[in-house]
Amino acid sequence: MSLTDLGAELVKLLPPEAAHRATIRALKAGLGVPVAPVHHNPALAVTLPKSGLKLHSPVGLAAGFDKNCDVPDAMAKFGFGFIECGTVTPRPQPGNPKPRLFRLTEDRAVINRMGFNNYGLDYFVRRLKAYRGEVPLGANVGANKDSTDRIADYVTGVEAVAPYAHYVTINISSPNTPGLRGLQDKASLEALLTACGAAERAGKPVFLKVAPDLDAQAIEDIVGVVRKQGAWLAGLIVSNTTLARPDSLASPHRDEAGGLSGMPLMEPSTKILAAFARELSGEFDLIGAGGISSGNDAHDKICAGAHAVQLYSALVFEGPGLVQRIHDELLHRLHTDGRGYITDIVGLAL
Ligand SMILES: Cc1cc2nc3c(=O)[nH]c(=O)nc-3n(C[C@H](O)[C@H](O)[C@H](O)COP(=O)(O)O)c2cc1C
């Protein structure tokens, strides 16, 4: 076990939110961050077709781990191909009352109802400006809970972060800000994307992050609006956490309110990803998230149409050494399947 993984084991002994705070603090101080540069294998390199983002690996860090953009350099050193920070809202806000983060250890899952706790755009943008890394850094923006004009919050967010980020994500799929997911409805989404399309984006790619709790009609509506926006929108991130509670959940925390992520989200979020990919692949970039904890999971998302993937919850159980393990497993899988490059398997299962 590496020192980093040992640290991750020790942190697991703390309650989840304290563990997260301790981890961010340690990373900020440089503790446990690898010093040796990660080896980049060209077989894993990807250029996202629409946005043109160049990644040394298709495996990224999902939003929510580094809400205030405190440690993107440190996280990049664990080997991630891209890092997404946020969600950031225009004004700082405390989020929901604690406890609001639960480990479902038996299920390799997490439930959170954090509610966009963050220090606000001013702090975030200062951190973003300080980033010197080469690994692409995405900035994920949202709306304040008490906002009277949520669409204006997104426009403010996009315009503030775009000059300094490699890409921007519009997050309308958190289940923990009441009414936020309503922005996925056809008319609201149209209004939101029209406003963001007119925003000053500094030429940066913009992604839309959607929920996994969508029926066929909702998917069709989103596809229609996204296609109509056409040129300026880079693609979709599929998906955020789920409100569903599969019968298989065994943890005593299973009925906590909030979004469920981790292993039980792998299958449903991959199905939704494939549904979007069947409609949109070739037209938009697709980033798959939800339940990835192995090279096989990342492989399955890519075969379901993802050009790149993101993960968060599995880090809670596996520690950051997971990124390298996923790379090794992906390379092994490519080799046994007789494929040369990760880009050869995009959408193979569709
Ligand atoms: C504690 C926690 C906080 C999160 N916060 C955010 C957030 O602020 N913005 C966002 O877009 N997604 C957020 N997410 C969702 C993740 O980015 C990801 O989409 C989801 O957890 C599925 O991936 P996973 O199963 O690998 O965790 C959060 C997830 C967790 C577990």
Image: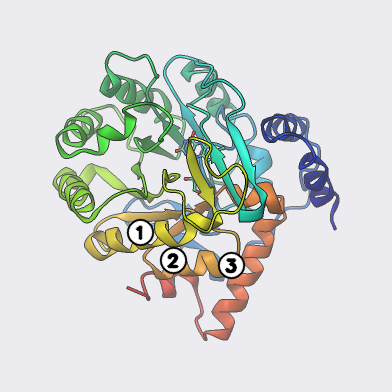
Whichever of callouts 2 and 1 sits on the residue coming sooner in the sequence is 1
Q: Which one is closest to the eye, mark 2 or mark 1?
A: 1
Q: Residue 102, located in which quarter of the rendered image? A: top right
Disc 2 target residue: 302
Q: Give percent across and percent down for residue 11.
A: 78, 40
Q: CA distance from mark 2 to mark 3?
A: 11 Å
In depth, the one of 27 and 7 nearer the eye is 7
Residue type at mark 1 is Leu
> Does residue 18 appear anywhere in the picture?
yes
Whichever of callouts 3 and 1 sits on the residue coming sooner in the sequence is 1
In the picture, measured across the screen, residue 103 lies left or right of residue 23, that is left
Whichever of callouts 2 and 3 sits on the residue coming sooner in the sequence is 3
- Does 153 appear above or below 269? above
In depth, the one of 186 and 199 nearer the eye is 186
Q: CA distance from mark 2 to mark 1?
A: 10 Å
Residue 295 marker: 3
**Crowd class of label 1 (few under 14; some 14 to 19; many from 20; radius 10 Å):** many
> Does residue 55 appear anywhere in the picture?
no
- Does 333 appear above or below 293? below
- Does 60 appear above or below 342? above
Disc 1 target residue: 273
In the picture, measured across the screen, residue 152 lies left or right of residue 65, that is left
Quadrant position of the N terminus in the picture: bottom right
Q: Is the CB atom of the residue marked by disc 1 within 8 angstroms of ligand 1's nearest atom?
A: no
Name which residue lies at 22% across and 61% down. Answer: 279
In depth, the one of 12 and 335 nearer the eye is 12
In the picture, measured across the screen, residue 29 lies left or right of residue 71, that is right
Residue type at mark 3 is Gly
